[in-house]
Image (tube, grey):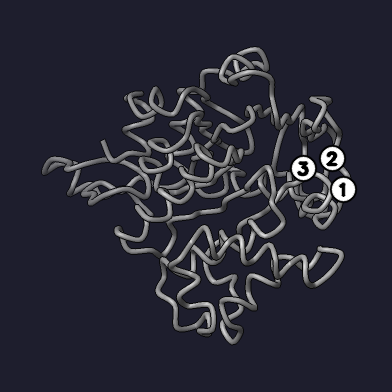
């Protein structure tokens, strides 16, 4: 996308990436260049300071990617139990690759991913498979839109979320607990998933991940493809899971304003590295972040 010189001459309504109405469009390449120029540097000590209590999820010097291609370069990440972290940045910055790496979808070239056990000991889960991450480490991945099985009922979709349970009855029992939590889904339990609204489908995707009762939720683009009223509903659900149920949430969100309003911690990524890190509300107030990502 080339910059619109006419818009720049006539006066800009806003500048930014993936937010609002713009007269001047900034290309991904230009956003990447500008973020690199304002990068503040993020030492492990600075990331530790953003954590309440001890880190619950910790990534150290992670280099990862797909095949032989390295996307992430010496990534460090910290988030405490019951905290939320939002990753923002231009396309290709490596945001989803971080989620993929935590869950076991990438090649890990070096570095470590650790999660606290029940006794507080940090356990290395770097090399676990996705199934082991879910069943042993309590890490669940909530995919982007369209991951439900449209021809299955809501109830059957939830049962699929418990596919790692030892017995089918355990999955069904866990599904009933989800129905108790979300009466909106319970009322549609015998409906095929394809008839659900966009917001209901996203609720089902989140709920299916809850069947295994994970401690960590990796949430990829929760607002993508949703109407504003459903976006608010989804973030209310995530807030309830964090504040009331104590879930730790690591999120990728292109709607940077919504993501940073929600999250305790925000990281701005560029070219596979963390360029800026801080409390979510501080990044919202950061004029450099605002200009590039918040349409201001």
Residue 47: x percent and y percent? 61, 20
Residue 293 tag number:
none
Which residue corresponds to mark 2?
125
* SS state under label 2: loop
Q: Nearer the viewer, residue 93 or 60?
A: 60
* SS state under label 1: loop
The answer to which of marks 2 and 3 sits earlier in the sequence is 3
Give the alpha-carbon distance from disc 1 to disc 3, as whole Å: 15 Å
The answer to which of marks 1 and 3 sits earlier in the sequence is 3
Residue found at x 70% / y 70% = 172
- State which mark lies toward you, 1 or 3: 1
Give the alpha-carbon distance from disc 2 to disc 3, as whole Å: 14 Å
Give the alpha-carbon distance from disc 2 to disc 1, as whole Å: 5 Å
Which residue corresponds to mark 1?
128
Do tag 1 and tag 3 residues touch (Cβ < 8 Å)? no
Q: Residues within 10 Å of mark 2 (few under 14, many from 20)?
A: some
In this rendering, is residue 259 above or below 144? above
> Which quadrant would the N terminus be assigned to in this image?
bottom left
Do tag 2 and tag 1 residues touch (Cβ < 8 Å)? yes
């Amino acid at each position: 996308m080339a910059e619109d010189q006419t818009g720049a001459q006539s006066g800009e309504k806003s500048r930014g990436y993936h937010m609002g109405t713009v007269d001047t469009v900034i290309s991904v390449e230009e956003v990447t260049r500008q973020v690199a120029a304002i990068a503040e540097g993020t030492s492990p000590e600075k990331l530790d300071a953003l954590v309440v209590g001890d880190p619950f999820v910790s990534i150290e010097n992670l280099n990862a990617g797909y095949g032989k291609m390295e996307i992430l370069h010496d990534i460090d990440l910290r988030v405490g139990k019951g905290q939320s972290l939002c990753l923002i940045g231009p396309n290709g910055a490596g945001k989803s690759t971080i989620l993929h790496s935590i869950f076991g979808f990438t090649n890990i070239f070096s570095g470590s991913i650790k999660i606290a056990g029940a006794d507080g000991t940090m356990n290395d889960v770097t090399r676990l498979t996705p199934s082991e991450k879910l069943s042993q480490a309590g890490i669940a991945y909530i995919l982007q839109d369209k991951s439900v099985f449209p021809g299955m009922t809501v109830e059957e979709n939830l049962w699929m979320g418990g596919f790692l349970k030892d017995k089918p009855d355990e999955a069904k029992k866990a599904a009933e607990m989800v129905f108790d939590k979300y009466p909106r889904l319970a009322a549609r339990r015998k409906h095929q998933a394809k008839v659900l609204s966009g917001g209901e489908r996203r609720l089902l995707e989140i709920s299916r991940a809850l069947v295994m009762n994970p401690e960590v939720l990796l949430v990829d683009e929760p607002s993508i493809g949703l109407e504003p009223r459903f976006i608010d509903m989804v973030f209310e659900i995530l807030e309830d899971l964090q504040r009331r149920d104590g879930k730790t949430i690591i999120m990728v969100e292109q709607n940077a304003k919504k993501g940073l309003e929600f999250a305790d911690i925000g990281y701005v990524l560029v070219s596979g590295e963390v360029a800026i890190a801080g409390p979510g509300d501080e990044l919202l107030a950061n004029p450099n972040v605002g200009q590039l990502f918040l349409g201001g």
